[in-house]
Structures are given as structure tokens and as C-alpha cells.
């Protein structure tokens, strides 16, 4: 055990001497390892952070919700764009039909675009704010979260179409700032006074959401039809339906039931194709899986090329180091040092050199991810798992780059080595 510790200590000391003895040569040699680790772990960290964000968004929305829209998520938007655009928008009447006739549905939601309006509070105003008219169950289907003591519409407020609203985070911040509590205050929009009953938590970091509500205002669908002239039949306003299946209900069975009701409501003939699409988050998840795989592979390939260059550079350092210490190696062997002792000593020196390059790469990744997180308000993090992958990769590169020089040193003839 003492011999192993001595080998490690001497290897580390010699690696440090190599680094300090010729700083420029060491820097250029380790640059390949540093860039390689930066590429592989940097891309992996960015992709993992993006994937975590999307997975969290998916978990908030739920995997048992079917989104009924004009467009299919599983097809290229450009291929059948005009066919989809010609499809009719969804109506409140269709929502009522689904709500009443679906046997396997736990919740049914409907949202409708009300239009863009200017929202005012005292001397402050926010322009081009989008308004959505939503039904009672939408807050659970959307996974809405509120700041402070904010809340959703009560059943009475929804049924009566009360003049109340829910503000997106950015709208509330722009109108009231941090010093005024928006709850209970009245804002003006579209010629109406609306009392604020809730402010949504900032959703800017959540990539995968049906809507980014930060710059919007939510009102009840009843108020949208009563106070903002939104037609019950749908008309030209963008709209969508959401259906959450009961526990244990197969989504394909739920889809079939939805298709049956909507085809009946739209009087589609048996041979006519559906003029709507039923989408689930599993479709997006599978698409993202392939995208994440490609991105990870791209980072891996780029990093491997850089690591190969770095490996040859470190191997070159080790060959030079072995040549410079040939006499010393011969003396050690003459004094009884075993061949495996010399082998491990040189090998550990290469591992230390590559580990230093890898740690520099990881440090650069950490600095970069912190800077990007602060700049774009999106959490990119260097996880412990990716850090360990970077360290292990550096060690493997060190073993591969030092194996031949170490093997060459361990096979030296002591007498010949001392003469040199």
C-alpha cells in the first residue's frame, strides 16, 4: 500500500514539474483535452438542462391530457399548413358537447383567444396584451400556479361572468411594480373595469407550455362572451379543447370517444377525414428524445476529435518526459524498482496531466453556464453526474495517452538506460 501511495505521489509531483517546467508546451498539449471535455460535457449539460425543463413542463401538464387542436403535433407544420388553416375553429358548443357526452373524461377545458388589448392602471399601461377566455377546469389542465394569495375564478364568478381577471407575471409587474399588491385592484381593458384576483407565477423558464402566460390576461369564458363579444360558435377566434382522462382510462380509448363526439357535432360523413387533431404529450416527448439524442451525439463527436488531438499531445509530452528521465529510470531499476512500479509511475503522470486539462474544461463549463443562466434567465447547470463523466473521461484519455510511453519506459534495460 505504501508503494502505491509513493507511486501516486511521485507521479503527481513529476506531472506538476512537467506542467511548470515548460508552461507553453504544457498549455498547448492540454488544450485538446480541455476543449474536448468542454465540448462533450458542455453540450451534454445544455441538453440535459433543456431536457429537464421540458420534462418538468410535461409533468406539470400531465401525461393523461389530450389536446384537441387544428394542427397535429406529430407532422411537419409546413407540409399541410394551408389544409390545417382551413379547418374550423372550435366552439363553446363543441366544448359543451364533450363535457356532457364524454364518459371517460375527468375534466374538459376550453380556451378561446379574445384579442389584444391595452390594460391600464392609474397612469401605467401595458399595450398589446393578449386575452384568453377560459373555462372552469383550465387552471388544472394548464397547471396554473399563483403568486402569493392569488386564486382562480370561483364557480359563482365563472357562471355569472363577473368582471374579474388573472394577470400574467410581466403584466402585473409592469402595471403595479413591486411596491403595490395587485390583488383587489381594478384595471381597465376594452372599456371594462376588471378586478384582479390573481397573478400567475413567472413561466418564462418553462419552455413547453400551451401558452406563456407572462404577457397575458385570463378571464372567464362567460365574461369573454358577455363582455368582449366573443361568439359562442367560435368563428374566427383561435381556440382549443383539452380533455383529461379518468384514472385508469386508456388514452387511445379516450381519443376514440372524443373523435366520435366531434365528428357528430360537425356532421362529418363516414368517409370524410377528421378536420381536427387529437394530440398527446407523448408525441412531443418522443420527438424531443430524438432531438436530444442527435444533440448529444453531435457534442460527443466534436469532443472526441478534440480529445484525440489532446491524447496525442499528452502522449508526446510523456515520450519527451521518458526520454529526459531515461538515466533516472535506469538508476531506479538498478536499485530494485519493479517494472510495474515504473509503468504505474509514468501512467499516473499522464493521468494527472489529462485530469488537469479536464478540470480546466469543467471550470470553463461552470463559468459559461453561470453566465448564460444570468444573461437569458434560463437555468443551465453542470450536474454532479456530468462532472463525474468529465473526470472519468479525462482519466481514460490519460490512460490511453500514457500507456505506450509507460510501457516503453518499463521495458528499458537498466544498464542501457544508465548509459544514456
Image (tube, rainbow, N blue to C red):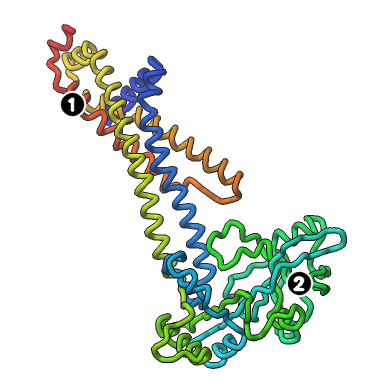
Residue sitting nearer the eye, 413 or 390: 390
Cα gap from disc 1 to disc 2, whole angstroms:
75 Å
Q: Residues within 10 Å of mark 2 (few under 14, many from 20)?
A: some
Where residue 12 appears, as percent x and y from the top left, is 35, 25
Work out which quarter of the rendered image holds the C terminus and state it.
Answer: top left
Badge number at residue 197: 2
Q: What percent of the width, then of the height, locates residue 29? A: 35, 25
Quadrant hosting residue 164: bottom right
**Mark sitting earlier along the chain (1/2):** 2
As drawn, 229 above or below 208: below
User: Mark 2 falls on what kind of element?
Assistant: strand
Any mark on residue 407, and which?
1
| Relative horizontal placement of residue 239, taking residue 150 as reference (left or right) | left
Q: Can residue 341 be seen in this view?
A: no
Q: At x 45% / y 52%, what residue is drawn?
A: 48
Instruction: Reply above or below: 89 against 348.
Output: below
Between 391 and 61, the residue placed more toward the observer is 61
Give how far across and how far down residue 75 sits, in percent. 42, 68
Q: Residue furthest right?
A: 122
Q: Which residue occupies 39% across, 50% down?
A: 295
Q: Is mark 1 on a helix, strand or loop?
A: helix
Quarter of the image where one finds residue 283: bottom left
Tell me if I can see residue 260 in this picture.
yes
At horizontal 25% and vertical 33% (from top left) the residue drawn is 400
In the drawing, what numbered circle is on residue 244?
A: none
Amino acid at each position: 500500500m505504501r508503494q502505491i501511495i509513493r507511486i501516486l505521489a511521485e507521479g503527481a509531483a513529476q506531472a506538476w514539474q512537467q506542467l511548470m517546467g515548460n508552461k507553453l508546451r504544457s498549455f498547448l498539449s492540454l488544450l485538446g483535452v480541455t476543449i474536448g471535455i468542454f465540448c462533450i460535457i458542455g453540450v451534454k449539460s445544455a441538453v440535459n438542462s433543456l431536457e429537464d425543463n421540458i420534462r418538468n413542463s410535461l409533468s406539470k401538464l400531465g401525461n393523461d391530457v389530450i389536446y384537441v387542436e387544428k394542427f397535429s403535433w406529430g407532422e411537419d407544420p409546413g407540409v399541410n399548413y394551408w389544409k390545417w388553416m382551413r379547418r374550423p375553429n372550435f366552439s363553446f358548443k363543441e366544448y359543451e358537447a364533450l363535457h356532457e357526452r364524454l364518459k371517460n373524461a375527468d375534466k374538459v377545458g376550453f380556451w378561446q383567444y379574445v384579442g389584444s388589448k391595452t390594460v391600464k392602471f392609474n397612469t401605467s399601461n401595458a399595450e398589446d396584451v393578449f386575452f384568453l377566455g377560459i373555462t372552469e377546469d383550465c387552471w388544472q389542465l394548464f397547471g396554473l400556479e399563483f403568486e402569493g394569495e392569488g386564486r382562480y375564478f370561483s364557480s359563482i364568478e365563472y357562471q355569472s361572468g363577473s368582471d374579474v381577471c388573472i394577470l400574467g407575471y410581466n403584466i402585473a409587474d409592469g402595471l403595479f411594480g413591486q411596491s403595490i399588491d395587485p390583488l383587489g385592484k381594478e384595471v381597465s381593458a376594452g372599456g371594462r373595469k376588471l378586478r384582479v384576483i390573481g397573478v400567475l407565477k413567472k413561466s418564462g423558464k418553462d419552455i413547453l407550455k400551451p401558452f406563456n402566460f407572462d404577457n397575458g390576461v385570463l378571464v372567464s369564458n362567460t365574461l369573454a362572451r358577455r363582455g368582449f363579444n366573443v361568439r359562442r360558435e367560435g368563428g374566427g377566434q383561435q381556440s382549443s379543447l383539452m380533455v383529461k382522462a379518468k384514472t385508469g382510462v386508456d388514452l387511445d380509448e379516450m381519443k376514440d370517444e372524443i373523435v366520435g363526439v366531434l365528428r357528430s357535432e360537425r356532421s362529418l360523413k363516414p368517409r370524410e377525414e377528421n378536420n381536427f387533431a387529437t394530440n398527446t404529450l407523448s408525441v412531443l416527448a418522443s420527438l424531443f428524445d430524438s432531438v436530444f439524442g442527435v444533440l448529444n451525439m453531435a457534442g460527443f463527436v466534436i469532443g472526441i476529435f478534440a480529445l484525440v488531438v489532446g491524447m496525442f499531445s499528452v502522449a508526446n509530452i510523456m515520450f519527451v518526459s521518458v526520454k529526459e528521465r531515461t538515466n533516472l529510470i535506469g538508476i531506479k531499476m538498478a536499485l530494485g524498482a519493479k517494472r510495474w512500479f515504473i509503468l504505474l509511475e509514468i501512467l499516473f503522470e499522464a493521468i494527472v496531466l489529462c485530469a488537469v486539462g479536464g478540470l480546466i474544461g469543467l471550470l470553463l463549463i461552470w463559468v459559461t453556464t453561470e453566465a448564460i443562466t444570468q444573461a437569458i434567465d434560463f437555468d443551465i447547470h453542470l450536474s454532479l453526474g456530468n462532472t463525474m463523466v468529465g473526470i472519468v473521461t479525462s482519466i481514460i484519455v490519460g490512460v490511453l495517452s500514457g500507456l505506450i510511453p509507460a510501457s516503453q519506459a518499463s521495458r528499458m534495460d537498466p544498464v542501457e538506460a544508465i548509459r544514456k
